[in-house]
């Protein structure tokens, strides 16, 4: 059985006259639109270019509008659009499913009824068809008729003739096993029918076909049922789907607005806290509750504030300590210069006194220069070494030993070095190792001791570099137990070290260099010797650049 889809609505134009088409007017032939241009063929006008330009401008306009929306508005719009799309897809699927099922049920019902009527022969008898009303047959909702192979049509009494055309004539002529099924008319704009035709035979009037069976004529029994009830049902279904879809979109927008307001409230607090920090420089952390992504962001923000507060505190303490430490050498230099100026006004100092005063000024200037260099190094406060390069640590230690040995010629140096490559800043590591050796040389000589005249060393410094572990051991008195936890703090001076030269920043720079290179430094006392400082650095193969 051949079927045509319900959306196919052929007109009555071109059908043979007398086919019984009440109220149908022949349709005018519609002009065909021009086909697409062939490749390489120029476009007749600029409509295509104008459409592309308009689409591009529309897309740019939408992007500009979306980017200017707040995050709150974007969440609300996203929820409404998402639910709108979901409702639209579900509504279209439901509408198409119901529509298809209703038409399928109608087609099956019409086909079965018409086939049964054709087999019983009640409607194929022209006397019954033309004299019996369709109301009496229980077919008041449909139109019944018959058309012969020659195109001659017959209708039921008190009922319009159903639409008939070439499809129904073909069924009458072929007398096959399949039926014809099609939709005619215009939906919601006039007569709209579902027409089915099945093969049949009829006996002309005033002819006795029982005695003359050769006079039986082939025909097609045609039944047409109005689709107005189905169209009305589908229309009502569409209205209901549209109404519920609109309600769903509005509800989704309201829900998205509520979700955005409650979900973005912590983000608003975080934004307010950031603005407060920017305006007041108050690094007080914000309260955090929950474990969602915004809570994680708030915790990260608090961690950033804490790190910033620690850095600010370090800088503040560094400035305070630096001001205190710089005051002493500057005061000493000023005092010596004032004494020199007063002596010059009174006639001058003796040459040996003047030389001693200038030597004192030079020593204070050297101490001030060293202090400023140490402060500059510590004030960088960078978490990692920048512009790291592959260096040989044993060469760095060897250069530092040579440098410090010239400054402390009265010491015995026991040095054993093994190669060890590291990634780092050669200048910073060299300064750290030099500070360790200077510290060991300073405390290996007893305070107030004079150089020995017999050529024997007055102290001993032991330097070992094995597998990235540098140990520097002096022969001094060691470090007091109360001072061990504080030896690497900035400007910390033990009671024994206050009478010796130094800024109190040397070991702090060593710790700073070790941390920047991913290593560590610690101090301890060695029985029978003095203080021992151990610096560990990771191998170049295990370091990340």
Image: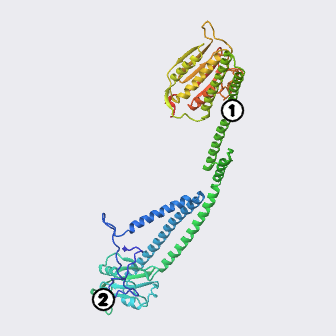
Q: Quadrant of the N terminus?
A: bottom left
Which residue is at the front of the view, 452 or 275? 452
Residue 370 in percent (x, y) is at 62, 26
Q: Quadrant of residue 324?
A: top right
Residue 390 in percent (x, y) is at 48, 29
* Number of marks: 2
Which residue is at the front of the view, 454 or 68? 454
Which mark is drawn over residue 209? 2
Residue visible at 36% across and 76% down in the picture = 179
Q: Quadrant of residue 363?
A: top right
Instruction: In the rendered view, tell whether residue 352 sits above or below residue 288.
Output: above
Q: Nearer the viewer, mark 1 or mark 2?
A: 1
Looking at the image, the residue that sits furthest to the top is 454
Residue visible at 51% across and 66% down in the picture = 88
Asked whether the viewer can see residue 321, the reply is: yes
How far apart are the two marked residues, 1 and 2, measured between alpha carbons?
132 Å
Residue 365 in percent (x, y) is at 64, 25
Instruction: In the rendered view, tell whether residue 427 sits above or below residue 155.
Output: above
Looking at the image, the residue that sits furthest to the bottom is 206
Asked whether the viewer can see residue 538, the reply is: no
Badge 2 marks a residue whose secondary structure is loop
Image-based side of 394 in relation to 272, left or right: left
Q: Which residue is mark 1?
A: 323
Residue visible at 49% across and 79% down in the picture = 229
Q: Quadrant of residue 489?
A: top right
**Mark 2 crowd level (few <14, some 14–19, many ≥20, 10 Å Cα):** some
């Amino acid at each position: 059985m051949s079927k045509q889809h319900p959306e196919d609505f052929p007109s009555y134009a071109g059908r043979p006259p007398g086919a019984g088409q009440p109220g149908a007017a022949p349709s005018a032939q519609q002009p065909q639109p021009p086909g697409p241009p062939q490749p390489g063929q120029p476009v007749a006008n600029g409509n295509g270019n104008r459409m592309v330009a308009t689409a591009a401008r529309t897309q740019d306009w939408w992007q500009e509008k979306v980017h200017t929306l707040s995050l709150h508005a974007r969440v609300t719009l996203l929820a409404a659009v998402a639910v709108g799309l979901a409702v639209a897809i579900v509504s279209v699927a439901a509408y198409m499913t119901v529509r298809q099922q209703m038409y399928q049920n109608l087609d099956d019902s019409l086909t079965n009824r018409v086939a049964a009527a054709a087999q019983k022969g009640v409607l194929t008898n022209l006397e019954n068809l033309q004299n019996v009303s369709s109301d009496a047959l229980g077919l008041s909702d449909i139109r019944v008729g018959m058309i012969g192979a020659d195109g001659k049509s017959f209708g039921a009494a008190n009922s319009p003739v159903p639409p008939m055309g070439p499809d129904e004539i073909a069924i009458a002529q072929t007398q096959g096993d399949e039926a014809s099924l099609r939709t005619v008319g215009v939906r919601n704009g006039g007569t709209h029918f579902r027409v089915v035709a099945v093969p049949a035979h009829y006996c002309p009037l005033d002819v006795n076909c029982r005695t003359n069976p050769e006079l039986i004529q082939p025909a097609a029994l045609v039944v047409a049922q109005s689709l107005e009830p189905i169209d009305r049902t589908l229309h009502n279904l569409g209205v209901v789907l549209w109404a519920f879809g609109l309600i769903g979109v509005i509800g989704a927008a309201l829900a998205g607005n509520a979700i955005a307001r409650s979900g973005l409230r912590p983000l608003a607090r975080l934004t307010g806290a950031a603005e407060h920090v920017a305006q007041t420089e108050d690094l007080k952390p914000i309260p955090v509750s929950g474990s969602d992504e915004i809570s994680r962001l708030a915790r990260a923000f608090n961690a950033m504030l804490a790190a910033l507060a620690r850095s600010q505190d370090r800088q503040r303490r560094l400035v305070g300590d630096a001001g205190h430490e710089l005051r002493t050498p500057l005061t000493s230099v000023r005092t010596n210069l004032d004494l020199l100026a007063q002596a010059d006004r009174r006639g001058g100092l003796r040459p040996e006194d003047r030389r001693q005063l200038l030597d004192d000024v030079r020593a204070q200037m050297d101490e001030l220069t060293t202090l400023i260099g140490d402060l500059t190094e510590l004030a960088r406060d960078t978490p990692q070494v920048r512009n790291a390069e592959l260096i040989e640590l044993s060469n760095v230690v060897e250069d530092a030993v040579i440098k410090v040995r010239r400054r402390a010629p009265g010491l015995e140096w026991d040095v054993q070095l093994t190669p060890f490559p590291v990634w780092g800043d050669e200048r910073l590591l060299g300064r750290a190792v030099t500070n360790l050796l200077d510290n060991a040389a300073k405390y290996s000589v007893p305070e107030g001791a004079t150089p020995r005249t017999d050529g024997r060393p007055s102290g001993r410094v032991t330097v070992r570099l094995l597998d990235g572990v540098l140990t520097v051991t002096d022969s001094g008195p060691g470090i007091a137990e109360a001072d061990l936890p504080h030896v690497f703090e900035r400007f910390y001076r033990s009671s024994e070290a206050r009478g010796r030269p130094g800024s109190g920043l040397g070991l702090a720079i060593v710790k700073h260099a070790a941390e920047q290179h991913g290593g560590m430094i610690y101090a301890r006392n060695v029985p029978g010797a003095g203080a021992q400082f151990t610096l560990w650095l990771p191998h170049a193969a295990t370091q990340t650049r």
